[in-house]
């Protein structure tokens, strides 16, 4: 037979007490018997645990109904489960819950040392900067370790105290039915320590916000979306914990002449109808701030591409370099004078299928198509 005290008596409420009365009674008693308010009194710690256990059961409708019917036997190890359900079974269920809800990964947080958060910084660079590489200076607001308390969160001359509820583990275990559940300690919020006299500079967090200047090395050949990690340059950890990391996300600004495709560069150049017909050459800029000549053979069609080897972007962390492709677009003359119109009309009369074979072939097929349909 259980020797535990009645949960209703523990919370000093009637059996018909509603949720609000239960909560009010729990808060009142928890404040009164909290170990931090009764240092050195072992009985207050036991009383506090009894109060917490009673409230955990009675605030849940199903658990309360089971308790009202079976008493403490409803939650004792093996109660109502028959033989074969011992402590090992409860431990196994605890492991299952840890795997499902990630509880195992939250263990070992005693001491209040928590890793700082990772930070993200978005940086836009030009295509030329991606080609050459650069060292950039950035300024970011970031949480750093408080110098006044050295990151402990406690006022100078004092120290955080071990949480009496969890013994510094940051988590508490509670038996419920056939298994044991582990949860974050409500007393210290999982930190394992309590700060009675917080540092006035950081208000107990162990961190303060400062502007930090950092140097970022951007290697040659970075692409849009490249991520650069600066280890340990994120937010400072809570109460002396390790800092997080800073991630620089790069984006490339649009360029006046070039479009990038991996390590290759593409450039579109408009040329005159005469240059396309007779051939010629022109100069185009290159990404290394130089220039190169492109020779156009006679009869060049619009859309033709010309490859210039090794004038593209460097491949990241490699000695390879992409190519540059120049695509010509034949521009149709506009705003012609009367004389120019007459000359073009004369040229059209003198033209034959040999000068425009693609057009001549297409319209021949059109005539054949309509002729076939007419005869069918």
Image: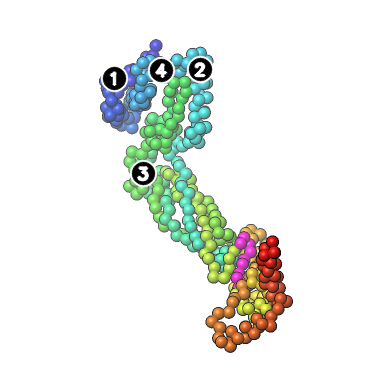
Residue at mark 2 to residue at mark 4: CA–CA distance = 14 Å
Q: Do callouts 2 and 4 mark residues in contact (Cβ within 8 Å)?
A: no
Residue at mark 1 to residue at mark 3: CA–CA distance = 41 Å
Q: Earlier in the sequence, mark 2 or mark 4?
A: 4
Q: Earlier in the sequence, mark 4 or mark 1?
A: 1
Left or right of 114 in this view: 55 = left
Residue receiving disc 2: 85
Residue receiving disc 4: 74
Residue at mark 4 to residue at mark 1: CA–CA distance = 17 Å
Q: Quadrant of the C terminus?
A: bottom right
Indicate the position of residue 213 as horizontal and vertical percent values. 46, 59
User: Secondary structure beneath disc 3?
Assistant: loop
Q: How packed is label 3: few (under 14 Cα within 10 Å), some, or many (20 or more)? A: many
Residue receiving disc 3: 204
Indicate the position of residue 7 as horizontal and vertical percent values. 33, 20
Indicate the position of residue 153 as horizontal and vertical percent values. 38, 44
Name the mark on residue 15.
Answer: 1
> As rendered, which of 149 and 220 lies closer to the eye?
220
Q: How packed is label 4: few (under 14 Cα within 10 Å), some, or many (20 or more)? A: many
Q: Which residues are magenta?
A: 261-269
Colour scheme of the rendered structure = rainbow
Q: Residue 179 colored magenta? A: no
Q: How packed is label 1: few (under 14 Cα within 10 Å), some, or many (20 or more)? A: few
Q: Earlier in the sequence, mark 1 or mark 2?
A: 1
> As rendered, which of 54 and 363 lies closer to the eye?
363
Q: Is residue 192 above or below residue 234?
A: above
Residue at mark 2 to residue at mark 3: CA–CA distance = 45 Å
């Amino acid at each position: 037979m259980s020797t535990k005290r009645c949960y209703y008596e523990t919370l000093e409420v009637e059996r018909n007490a509603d949720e609000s009365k239960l909560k009010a009674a729990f808060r009142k008693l928890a404040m009164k018997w909290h170990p931090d308010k009764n240092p050195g009194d072992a009985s207050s710690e036991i009383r506090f645990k009894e109060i917490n256990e009673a409230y955990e059961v009675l605030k849940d409708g199903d658990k309360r109904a089971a308790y009202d019917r079976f008493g403490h036997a409803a939650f004792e190890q093996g109660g109502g489960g028959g033989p074969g359900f011992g402590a090992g079974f409860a431990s196994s269920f605890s492991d299952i819950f840890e795997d499902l809800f990630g509880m195992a990964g939250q263990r070992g947080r005693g001491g209040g040392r928590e890793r700082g958060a990772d930070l993200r910084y978005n940086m836009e660079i030009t295509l030329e900067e991606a080609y050459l590489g650069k060292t950039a200076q950035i300024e970011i607001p970031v949480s750093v370790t408080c110098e006044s308390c050295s990151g402990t969160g406690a006022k100078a001359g004092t120290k955080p105290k071990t949480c009496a509820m969890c013994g510094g583990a940051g988590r508490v275990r509670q038996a419920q039915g056939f298994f044991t559940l582990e949860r974050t300690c409500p007393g210290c919020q999982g930190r394992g320590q309590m700060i009675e006299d917080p540092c006035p500079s950081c208000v107990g967090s162990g961190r303060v916000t400062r502007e930090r200047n950092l140097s970022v090395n951007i290697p040659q050949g970075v692409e849009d979306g490249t991520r650069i990690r600066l280890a340990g340059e994120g937010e400072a950890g809570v109460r002396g914990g390790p800092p997080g990391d800073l991630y620089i996300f790069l984006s490339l600004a649009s360029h006046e002449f070039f479009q990038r495709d991996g390590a290759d560069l593409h450039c579109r150049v408009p040329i005159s109808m005469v240059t396309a017909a007779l051939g010629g050459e022109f100069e185009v800029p290159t990404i290394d701030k130089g220039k190169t000549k492109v020779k156009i053979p006679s009869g060049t069609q619009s859309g033709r591409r010309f490859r210039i080897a090794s004038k593209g972007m460097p491949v990241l962390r490699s000695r390879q370099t992409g190519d540059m492709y120049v695509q010509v677009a034949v521009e149709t003359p506009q705003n012609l004078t009367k004389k120019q119109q007459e000359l073009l009309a004369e040229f059209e009369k003198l033209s034959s299928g040999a000068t425009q074979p693609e057009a001549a072939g297409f319209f021949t097929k059109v005539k054949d198509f309509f002729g076939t349909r007419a005869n069918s």
